[in-house]
Image (tube, helix red, strand yellow):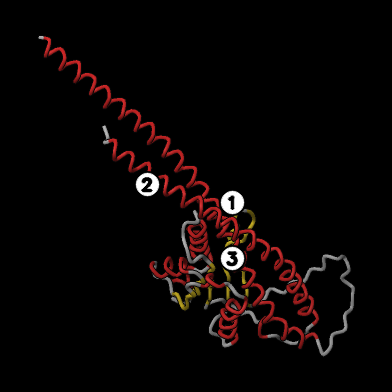
C-alpha cells in the first residue's frame, strides 16, 4: 500500500496543476474574444477585395505577372502558419499531419527534387519540419508575440518578389481556419499565381464599369494589397484557432485533474483505513499476549 505522505504530496501537486490549467483557460478565453472579433472584422474585407480583383482581371486585356501560370509547377513555396507555443491540444499536430498528407499527394516529386521550400510562421512548424528534413527556407519564430499587419505583409512581399523573379512557380498557404472554440478547418490555398475566377453574386453580370486610369493599372496596384490581406487574414484565423484550442485543452486538463484527485483521495482513504486496521490488530495482539 502506498505511503500516506506520498499520496498527500501527489494530491497537492495535482491541485496546483489544476489551478494552473484553470488560469490558462481563463487567459485563453479572454484572448479568444479579441482574436475572434478581429477575424470577423477582416473576413468581409478580404472577400470583397478578392471579388474586385476577379472583376478587374476579367476586364484587363494584357498579361499580368501575378497571373502567369507555369506549364508545370516544379518549384513550390509553401507558407505554413502554426503557433509559437504548445499546450493547445491537437492544434499543431492535426495541421502538420494534414500538410504532410497534402505534400505526399500533390508535391511528392518536388519534395524528392528539393524544389519544395517552406516558410514557417511560428516556432512549432519550424521545429517540426526542420527535424523531419524538409527544406525550410525561412522561419518567423515569435511571430505571434506582437501580431501586426506589417509583419504579415513583409512575409508576403518577400514571397511575391521571389515569385515575380521566377524563383517559384507557385506559392501556397496552409493554416488553421477558425470555425468555433473546439473546431478548426485545415486549409491549404494557392496564393500565386492568382485564381481570378469572377462570380457576381448580385445576379447582374451585365454591368459595365468605367475604370480610371485603366483596369490593368488598378489591378496591378491592388493585387499586392490583396495578397497582404490574405496572409494577414490567415494569421488572424490561426491566432483565434490557437486560443480556442488552448481553451478547450485546458478545460479538459482541469476536468482530468479533478478526476485524478478523486481517485487519489479514494486511494488515500483506503490506505488510511488499512493503516488503522493494522494498528488495531497490533494493539489487540499485544493485549492478548500480556493477558497470557
Q: Assign the C terminus to one quadrant of the image.
A: top left
* Residue under pointer 3: 188
Q: Assign the N terminus to one quadrant of the image.
A: top left
Q: Measure the C-alpha gap from mark 2 to mark 1.
A: 28 Å
Residue 214: quadrant of the picture: bottom right
- Report the label total: 3
Q: Measure the C-alpha gap from mark 3 to mark 1.
A: 20 Å
Q: Position of residue 198 (x, y in %)?
A: 77, 71
Which mark lies nearer to you, 2 or 1?
A: 2
Instruction: Assign a secondary structure to mark 3.
Output: strand
The residue positioned farthest toward the top in the image shown? 292
> Viewer-proximal residue, 169 or 182?
182
Q: Measure the C-alpha gap from mark 2 to mark 3.
A: 42 Å
Which mark lies nearer to you, 3 or 1?
A: 1
Q: Position of residue 288 (x, y in %)?
A: 15, 12
Tag 3 or tag 2, which sits nearer the N-term?
Answer: 2
* Residue under pointer 2: 13
* Residue under pointer 1: 182
Amino acid at each position: 500500500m502506498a505511503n500516506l505522505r506520498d499520496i498527500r504530496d501527489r494530491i497537492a501537486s495535482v491541485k496546483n496543476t489544476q489551478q494552473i490549467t484553470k488560469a490558462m483557460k481563463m487567459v485563453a478565453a479572454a484572448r479568444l474574444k479579441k482574436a475572434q472579433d478581429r477575424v470577423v472584422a477582416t473576413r468581409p474585407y478580404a472577400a470583397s477585395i478578392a471579388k474586385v480583383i476577379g472583376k478587374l482581371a476579367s476586364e484587363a486585356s494584357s498579361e499580368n505577372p501575378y497571373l502567369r501560370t507555369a506549364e508545370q509547377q516544379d518549384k513550390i513555396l509553401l507558407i505554413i502558419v502554426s503557433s509559437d507555443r504548445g499546450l493547445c491540444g491537437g492544434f499543431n499536430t492535426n495541421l502538420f499531419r494534414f500538410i504532410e498528407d497534402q505534400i505526399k499527394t500533390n508535391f511528392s516529386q518536388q519534395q524528392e527534387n528539393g524544389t519544395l521550400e517552406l516558410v514557417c510562421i511560428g516556432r512549432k512548424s519550424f521545429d517540426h519540419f526542420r527535424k523531419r528534413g524538409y527544406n525550410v527556407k525561412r522561419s518567423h519564430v515569435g511571430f505571434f508575440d506582437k501580431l501586426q499587419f506589417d509583419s504579415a505583409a513583409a512575409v508576403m512581399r518577400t514571397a511575391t518578389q521571389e515569385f515575380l523573379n521566377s524563383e517559384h512557380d507557385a506559392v501556397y498557404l496552409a493554416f488553421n481556419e477558425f470555425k468555433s472554440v473546439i473546431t478548426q478547418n485545415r486549409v491549404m490555398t494557392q496564393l500565386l499565381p492568382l485564381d481570378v475566377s469572377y462570380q457576381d453574386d448580385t445576379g447582374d453580370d451585365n454591368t459595365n464599369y468605367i475604370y480610371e486610369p485603366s483596369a490593368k493599372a488598378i489591378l496591378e496596384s491592388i493585387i499586392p494589397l490583396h495578397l497582404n490581406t490574405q496572409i494577414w487574414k490567415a494569421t488572424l484565423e490561426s491566432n483565434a484557432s490557437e486560443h480556442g484550442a488552448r481553451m478547450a485543452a485546458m478545460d479538459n486538463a482541469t476536468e482530468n485533474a479533478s478526476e485524478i484527485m478523486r481517485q487519489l483521495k479514494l486511494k488515500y482513504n483506503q490506505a488510511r483505513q488499512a493503516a488503522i486496521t493494522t494498528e488495531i490488530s497490533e494493539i489487540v495482539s499485544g493485549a492478548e499476549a500480556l493477558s497470557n
